[in-house]
Amino acid sequence: MKLTLVDIPKINLPQLNPFSTNLPQLELPNLNLTESLNTLGSFASQGQTIVTAALNHPFLAIGTIVVSIGLIQLIADLVKRVLRAGIRLILTLPFTLSRWIWNRATASLETATHEKAKIAQLIERLETLRAEQDEVVTELKGLIDSSAAISETKPPLQSANSGSSALQKSAESPQS
């Protein structure tokens, strides 16, 4: 079956006229066309003033252009460094965090084993000191016992105060 133009039904489409007043108006509350045009006009006049000044003072214009290019390069380099540092931080952050978490988890185990080793070392030192103290006490008892045996064989010595008072009495008797 073959279709012809006569067989196709006609569809009535509304006529869209861009200048028609029947269209809904698009309103943007923050957009003011007259202000935008004034801003563009002032920008164009400032550009014209800059071009005129550059033509009147070529050395100053060349210096300004060189300084501007230098500043743009510095700003671009700064942005590049910040982006590189940010990307490096983003890429290494998972590894850094996992290493930090691992160190935190194993540090408590290492601290516990380190504390146990230190306690064992201190107990060993105390036992060594106790053994040394026992030796010193034994040696001291031996010296005290030997000095007691010597003092038993000799007559008891008078104290230093009583000896000095006897000397004073003997010194006083010849005078009287």
Image: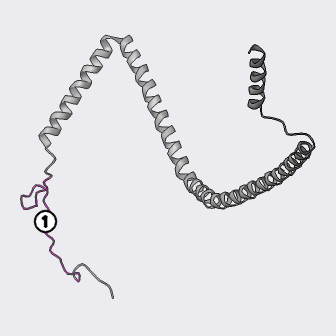
Q: Is residue 159 magenta?
A: no
Instruction: Return the x and y of residue 50 as percentages of the image width and height.
Output: 28, 20
In the picture provided, is 115 more to the left or to the right than 59? right
Q: Which residue is mark 1?
A: 15
Say few, some or many: other residues with alpha carbon within 10 Å of mark 1 (under 14 / 14 to 19 / 20 or more). Answer: few
- Which residue is more in the foreground, 37 or 1? 37
Q: How many marks?
A: 1
Tell me the quarter of the picture where residue 99 sits.
Answer: bottom right
x, y percentage for residue 63?
40, 15
Rendered-image quadrant of the N terminus: bottom left
Work out whether 78 lies above or below 61. Answer: below
Residue at the spot x=76%, y=19% of the render? 173
| Viewport quadrant of the C terminus | top right
Asked whether, in this view, residue 155 is left or right of residue 26, the answer is right
Range of residues picked out in magenta = 7-27
Disc 1 marks a residue whose amino acid type is: Gln
Secondary element under disc 1, as helix, strand or loop, is loop
Rendered residue at 6%/58% (across/down): 21
Q: Nearer the viewer, residue 30 or 57?
A: 30
Give the x, y percent position of residue 163. 78, 29
